[in-house]
Image: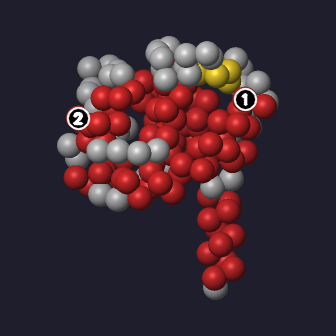
Amino acid sequence: MSEFVDNIIVLKTNIFALTPVLVSFYKNLKMQENNVLLSYFVFPIVLNNTSKQKLKTIRVDSSLNKITKDKEIMAGFEERFDFYKDITNKCLQYAMECNYIKLNDDMSVSVLADNNLFTDAGLSESMKLASNLYKIFKKDVINTYYEFGIKRI
């Protein structure tokens, strides 16, 4: 049984399947200094079933408070943030090596190509949500970390 659970976790955290989700996040995000650090928020939000259901209606006038003030979304967020940290690093590295994204000198991310990415059908809802997160991530990186209560990376 333990081996089965380990295999499911490997499938759910596959960098080849998750990288398009991360690239879709940066596709619409406005360029700002240090926005590479926002990538650590993507997977804990878009791969969480509660977040996906509650954030389907993100609008341009939505604020970050829609996430940070919702107790159901924030329950266990720090653990999810820590869990996906290494996976996020690997996805960023893979995306840069495949020339999907570029890390600029000011630590901002530019999308170079997003049209030839393999997309897992099971992640389509997460990809759509990730591409809409730009509507919420309007604050600078430091204030975003402060609102989420994250004190360290």
Q: Residue at left 61%, top 30%?
A: 23
The residue type indicated by label 2 comes to Asn
Quarter where residue 6 is shown: bottom right
Q: Is residue 131 above or below residue 70?
A: above
Quadrant where the N terminus sits is bottom right
In the rendered structure, find residue 83 and report the number of the disc placed on it. none
Residue 123 position in % (x across, y down): 58, 45
Whether residue 138 is visible here, answered yes or no, is yes
Residue occupying the point 50% across, 45% down? 43
Type of amino acid at the residue the image marks with label 1: Met
Residue contact between numbered discs 1 and 2, judged by CB atoms under 8 Å: no
Q: Position of residue 17 (x, y in %)?
A: 68, 46
> Foreground: 54 or 47?
47
Which residue does the numbered mark 2 point to in the structure image? 65
The disc, 1 or 2, on the residue closer to the chain's N-terminal end is 2
Residue 96 numbered mark, or none: 1
Mark 1 is surrounded, within 10 Å at the Cα level, by few (under 14), some (14 to 19) or many (20 or more) other residues, namely: some
Give me the C-alpha separation between circle 1 and circle 2.
31 Å
In the rendered image, is residue 17 in sight?
A: no
Helix, strand or loop at disc 1?
Answer: helix
**Residue 100 x/y as whole percent:** 72, 25
Above or below — where is 6 with respect to 117?
Answer: below
